[in-house]
Image (spheres, helix red, strand yellow):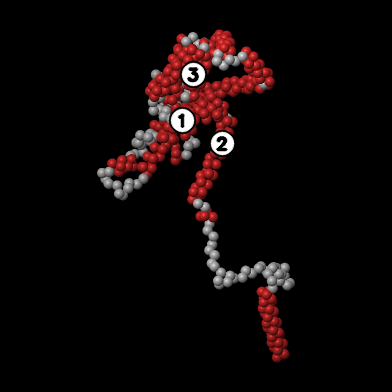
């Protein structure tokens, strides 16, 4: 028993001695690693010790932390950068929108034409319904009568052009001969050979570009086909808007967020009033222009007086620019056919009628419905013509007028809603008029909003003009 105990005791001593030796070896190894150069592998291991950075001396200056880069950039540069990337995103959105509009321009122009025709014909539908006719019958009578009248006007213009085309051709040839005679005997002293060279160059250009001329003719056929397709689509749009405008407007309101639905419901009828007032006022002004200018050129014995009057009527739907183009066309026809004296008289008639229109007729007929600055009108017409040609120029101005009305109403509406939601100021005195007005606005019931707020009837109104 004693021998076993001795053997256990001696084994424990040997185990303790070995543990002490291992601890001593580990201590020596750590000192060797500390004295070894950096990035040297430890013997028996593939691990590489990292380089130890010595502590800075006591005399080294203290180095502060670098500031954030955003705090170093000047305020003006930061504002310019913020505005710049937002403008780039906005320009990209506008570019994509223009591309989409250009792709489906036929659809948009047809719908716009149908909307304008509806604004012109809708008062007749409302008047027939007040006389006791049903909605379908009133719509059918107005639709058929309106498009028959427009078709007859177009046929009459084409007929007049075909009737007067031989006379116009003869007068143009006579005018060219007179122009050649004046050029050779006038102050410019142009020789006959130079005139013949100009005619030869024109003939050669037509022969060299016959392929382009043929292509233009084929494109003209495509344009005619697109015009007919757009006209049919505009007729369908007009028919459905005249018959079911209220339901279409209510269906459109389902796509408006509920938070903005009340404001949009109030802006819609006001936009429709602006559009109908613009269309009817423009039709009246254009008719007066066409009648008086047509009478003037008729008494001056200018050929195709009636077609020119119709062109003046159509171009009057393009504000400012259309009057210039139609007047220039009338003066040019008078110059080529009847000479410079008649052209000057036609110019005087055109200028007189247009001055009466701009200073008397438009302020009296259109009134305050269309309050758009002339610069905005010119820019809108130019932009519309660049995007969609003549139809774009026709649609541009009523679009700007409607946007002007909608934006003005929504600004007033949001301001009044903010006034109602704002708590009364603690510094306000009871007798202060501003305090009384704010309290009155805050205490007004929802069914009795201010003048610019939409009424319940406006929420259920539609662009078909029914109230």
Please tell me which residue lies in front, 15 or 354: 354
> Where 314 falls versus 254 (above or below)?
above
Please tell me which residue lies in front, 171 or 273: 171
Please tell me which residue lies in front, 5 or 274: 274
- Would you say residue 53 is visible in this rendering? yes
Residue sitting farthest toward the bottom: 2
* Mark 1 residue crowding within 10 angstroms, few (<14) / some (14–19) / many (20+): few
Residue sitting farthest toward the right: 44
Name which of mark 2 and mark 1 comes first in the sequence. Answer: 2
CA–CA distance between discs 3 and 1? 21 Å
Name which of mark 3 and mark 1 comes first in the sequence. Answer: 3
CA–CA distance between discs 3 and 2? 35 Å
Residue occupied by mark 2 = 95
Asked if marks 3 and 1 touch (Cβ < 8 Å), the reply is no
**The C terminus lies in quadrant:** top left
Task: Provide the secondary structure element on which disc 2 rests.
Answer: helix
Residue occupied by mark 3 = 327
Query: Is 91 situated left or right of 270 in this image?
Result: right
* Mark 2 residue crowding within 10 angstroms, few (<14) / some (14–19) / many (20+): few
- To which quarter of the image does residue 416 belong? top left
Which residue occupies 53% across, 57% down? 68
Task: Tell which tag, 2 or 1, sits nearer the viewer.
Answer: 1
- Would you say residue 144 is visible in this rendering? no
Name which of mark 3 and mark 2 comes first in the sequence. Answer: 2
Asked if marks 3 and 2 touch (Cβ < 8 Å), the reply is no
Q: Position of residue 397 (x, y in %)?
A: 47, 28
Residue occupied by mark 1 = 375
**The N terminus lies in quadrant:** bottom right
Which residue occupies 50% across, 13% down? 340
């Amino acid at each position: 028993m004693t021998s076993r105990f001795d053997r256990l005791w001696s084994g424990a001593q040997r185990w303790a001695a070995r543990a002490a030796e291992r601890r001593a070896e580990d201590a020596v190894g750590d000192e060797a690693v500390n004295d070894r150069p950096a990035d040297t592998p430890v013997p028996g291991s593939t691990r590489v010790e990292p380089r130890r950075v010595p502590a800075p001396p006591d005399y080294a200056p203290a180095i502060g932390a670098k500031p954030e880069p955003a705090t170093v950039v000047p305020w003006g540069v930061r504002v310019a950068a913020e505005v710049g990337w937002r403008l780039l995103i906005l320009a990209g959105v506008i570019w994509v929108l223009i591309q989409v509009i250009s792709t489906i321009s036929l659809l948009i122009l047809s719908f716009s034409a149908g909307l304008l025709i509806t604004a012109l014909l809708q008062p007749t539908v409302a008047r027939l319904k007040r006389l006791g006719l049903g909605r379908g019958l009133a719509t059918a009578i107005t639709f058929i009568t309106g498009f028959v009248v427009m078709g007859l006007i177009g046929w009459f213009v084409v007929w007049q052009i075909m009737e007067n085309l031989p006379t116009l051709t003869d007068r143009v040839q006579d005018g060219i001969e007179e122009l050649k005679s004046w050029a050779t005997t006038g102050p410019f002293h142009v020789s006959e050979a130079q005139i013949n060279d100009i005619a030869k160059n024109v003939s050669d250009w037509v022969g060299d570009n016959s392929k382009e001329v043929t292509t233009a003719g084929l494109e003209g056929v495509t344009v005619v086909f697109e015009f007919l397709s757009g006209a049919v689509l505009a007729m369908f749009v007009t028919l459905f808007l005249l018959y079911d405008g209220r339901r279409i407007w209510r269906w459109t309101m389902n796509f408006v967020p509920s938070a903005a639905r009340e404001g949009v419901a109030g802006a819609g009828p006001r936009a429709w009033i602006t559009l109908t007032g613009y269309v009817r006022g423009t039709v009246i002004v254009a008719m007066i222009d066409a009648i008086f200018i047509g009478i003037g050129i008729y008494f001056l014995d200018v050929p195709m007086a009636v077609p020119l009057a119709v062109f003046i009527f159509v171009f009057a739907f393009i504000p400012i620019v259309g009057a210039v183009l139609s007047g220039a066309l009338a003066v040019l026809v008078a110059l080529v056919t009847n000479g410079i004296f008649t052209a000057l008289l036609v110019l005087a008639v055109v200028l007189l009628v247009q001055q009466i229109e701009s200073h008397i007729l438009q302020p009296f007929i259109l009134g305050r419905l269309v309050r758009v600055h002339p610069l905005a009108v010119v820019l809108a017409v130019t932009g519309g013509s660049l995007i969609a040609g003549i139809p774009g120029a026709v649609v541009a101005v009523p679009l700007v007028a409607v946007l002007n009305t909608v934006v003005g109403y929504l600004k007033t509406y949001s301001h009044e809603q903010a006034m109602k939601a704002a708590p009364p100021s603690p510094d306000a005195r009871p007798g202060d008029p501003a305090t009384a007005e704010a309290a009155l606005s805050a205490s007004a019931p929802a069914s009795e909003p201010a003048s610019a707020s939409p009424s319940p009837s406006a929420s259920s109104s539609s662009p078909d003009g029914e109230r």
